[in-house]
Every structure is written in C-alpha cells, then in structure tokens.
Image: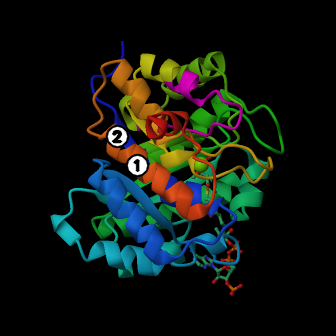
Amino acid sequence: HFPENVRIVEVGVRDGLQNEPTPVDTATKLALIRKLSESGLRHIEAASFVSPKWVPQMADHREIMQALAIEGEKSVTTYSALTPNLKGLEAALECGVREVAVFGAASESFSQRNINCSIAESLARFAPVMERALEAGVRVRGYVSCVMGCPYEGEISPLQVAAVARELSDMGCYEVSLGDTIGTGTPLKAKRLLEAVTREVSVERLAAHFHDTYGQALTNLYTVMEEGIAVIDSSVAGLGGCPYAKGASGNVATEDVIYLLEGLGIDSGVNLAQLARTGDWISRQLGRANGSKVGQALMAK
Ligand code: HMG
Ligand code: MG
C-alpha cells in the first residue's frame, strides 16, 4: 500500500552543503533555494543556527533566513532551519523563521560528538526550545540520528530509536524524521525499525531521512513507503558527503526519489526536468560530479 502523495523535504541546502568541502557563498545558496522552490519543492531546509566553529558552512544562517523571510506570508514554500538550543532558536526567531527543527540521536556517542551532550541532556535542552517556538507560532520538527547504525557504536536498537522518537513527539514535534545518518540501513532493517517506531509514534507523523552512503537509500525508501511513510527528506544532486567516510555519497538525491515516485504513480508536485537542471547547475557551481544518477541521465539526453 503506497501513499498517493509524498511530501519532499529538500535538505540539500542544509544537510548537503554542510558536508561540502568547498565554501558556498550566500548568494549562490539563495539562488539555489529559489530554483528549488520554482521546481515545485514546498519545504526547503535552508539553514542551521549552530556554532560556526562547528559547522563553518552554515555561518550565514541569519542572512539566509532574513532574505527568505522577506517573502513572508506570500511564500508557498516553507523555509525551515535547525535550532539545537535556545540561543539558536532566538536568533532564528529574530530572522522571522516559521519552522525550525531540533535534532537528537538514538546513539549516546553520536549525541556527544554531534551536539556535545547526552541524549537525556539534549531532550532537556529541546523542551524549552519547543515551548518558546510554539509560543511564537513556529512549528517544530524533530530528527533522530543513527536510526540504522552509528559510526561509533555500530548497531542501534530500534527500541532506542522508538523511545527517542516518542519523546520528541510527546514534546510537541509535529513530525519526527528518522535519520539513517551513515546510510548503513537495508530494507529488512528499515522494516523492523518502522515496526518498533510506529508502536510509539503513528506513521503519519514520521519521515524518512536516508543517506545513500551504501547505495541502499532508494530501496529502503521503497520499503518504508510500503509501510505508510509519506514524507521523504532528500538532497538535490545528492549534495553532501559523509564526514565519517571520505568520498562517500550524501543524502539520497531528490531527482532519484522523484523518478522512483513517478514510476509508482505517486505525486510529489515536483517538476523533475526543472529539478534536474537545478541539480546540474549547483553541481557545476561546486565543481563536483552530479550525485544524482537520474540527474546525470536526464542531462545527458
Ligand atoms: P556547545 O559547545 O556544547 O555549547 O555546543 P555551549 O552552549 O557551551 O557554547 C559554546 C560556544 O558555541 C559558545 O561560543 C556559544 O555562543 C556558541 P563561544 O563563547 O565559544 O564563542 N553557541 C552557538 N553559536 C551559534 N548558534 C548556536 C549556538 N549555541 C552555542 N545555536 C552546539 C552545542 C549544539 C551549539 C554545538 O555542538 C554545535 O553547533 N554542533 C553542531 C551540530 C550540527 O550542526 N551537526 C550537523 C547537523 S545534524 C545532522 O546533520 C543530522 C541530520 O541530518 C539527521 C541525520 O542525517 O541523522 C539532522
Ligand atoms: Mg542528515
């Protein structure tokens, strides 16, 4: 039973670029965001209010979100940003954001290395972020990293993922995105993961955020869509790499996901030809190979 429609959350500008070694200037990012929106993408994660010492590529978060906020209420596209703590949220609110995301993990070691605190501490930090955001009328999405494996701990129990997802959902996240951070998942694992997580959070409130490090992302997405997942996070041209594996692929490419959806008769509202041109454009801007197979094939025609 596949969903009739799938909502794509385009994360290339954030998750993709944060892992690109070449610094990308603000004007190029804004041009990319505009092109993505013009291709029909209605949710674009555009920035990250984190420490520029930790993630230099996201240092222009204010400029990006301020420029996008000027479109204001008129915009049909939601532009969201990551906010790991109150400091990040306050800065994001000053820039007029309408949606933010908090990000936790199902692995203790990953939590420590990524956001410098334990899982329990992270949840305690997110609670006031959530409260303040909801008070300001801003929606909050939640991420759980390492749902099918951790770069430091290896296997992660689906029960642990389910517990963290439940906490984020109970706290007020309208949706919890399940991150296969290092792309080690396979279809059977993905199925078992969903079995455990959907006991705690209903499938309508879950999203799949799969990295393609091992080339399994599309097949895993096919599997979770059969189980009712209808929100997919992906990155134009497969932007990004993996900080734990040099030269590895980034997020699953949006073009590849759209091609899969079209083949299944699932609507996403995205114009694939136009998106492929944008993927080709940003790849050339970055001087990297296009990370989307579908993008490569369409552009070679
Ligand atoms: P910390 O060092 O524990 O925090 O960092 P702190 O409160 O002790 O502050 C230390 C310094 O950071 C201070 O500056 C603060 O002002 C500054 P200093 O006095 O040293 O100059 N600071 C901030 N600056 C800007 N914005 C903020 C902020 N907060 C503190 N919001 C923190 C904690 C979370 C900030 C840090 O660990 C950090 O920035 N980590 C980066 C995490 C990150 O961006 N990771 C990548 C995104 S997550 C991801 O990609 C996974 C996902 O895609 C899903 C998946 O695939 O699994 C979502
Ligand atoms: Mg990610």
Residues in magenta, as a range: 206-221
Image quarter (top left, top right, bottom left or bottom right) of the C terminus: top left
Q: Amino acid at mark 1?
A: Arg
Q: What label sits on residue 277 in the rendered view?
A: 1
Front position in the image: 254 or 175: 254
Q: Secondary structure at mark 1?
A: helix
- Category of crowding for the residue at label 2, using alpha-carbon neighbours closer than 10 angstroms: few (below 14), some (14–19), many (at least 20): some
Residue indicated by mark 2? 273
- Is 207 placed above or below 30 here? above
Q: Whole-Å distance between the Cαs marked 1 and 2?
A: 6 Å
User: Where's residue 278, x and y in %?
Assistant: 41, 53
- Category of crowding for the residue at label 1, using alpha-carbon neighbours closer than 10 angstroms: few (below 14), some (14–19), many (at least 20): some
Q: Residue at x 78, y 31 (%)?
A: 155
Give the left or right position of residue 267, taking residue 217 as reference.
Answer: left
Q: What label sits on residue 85 in the rendered view?
A: none
Q: Amino acid at mark 2?
A: Ala
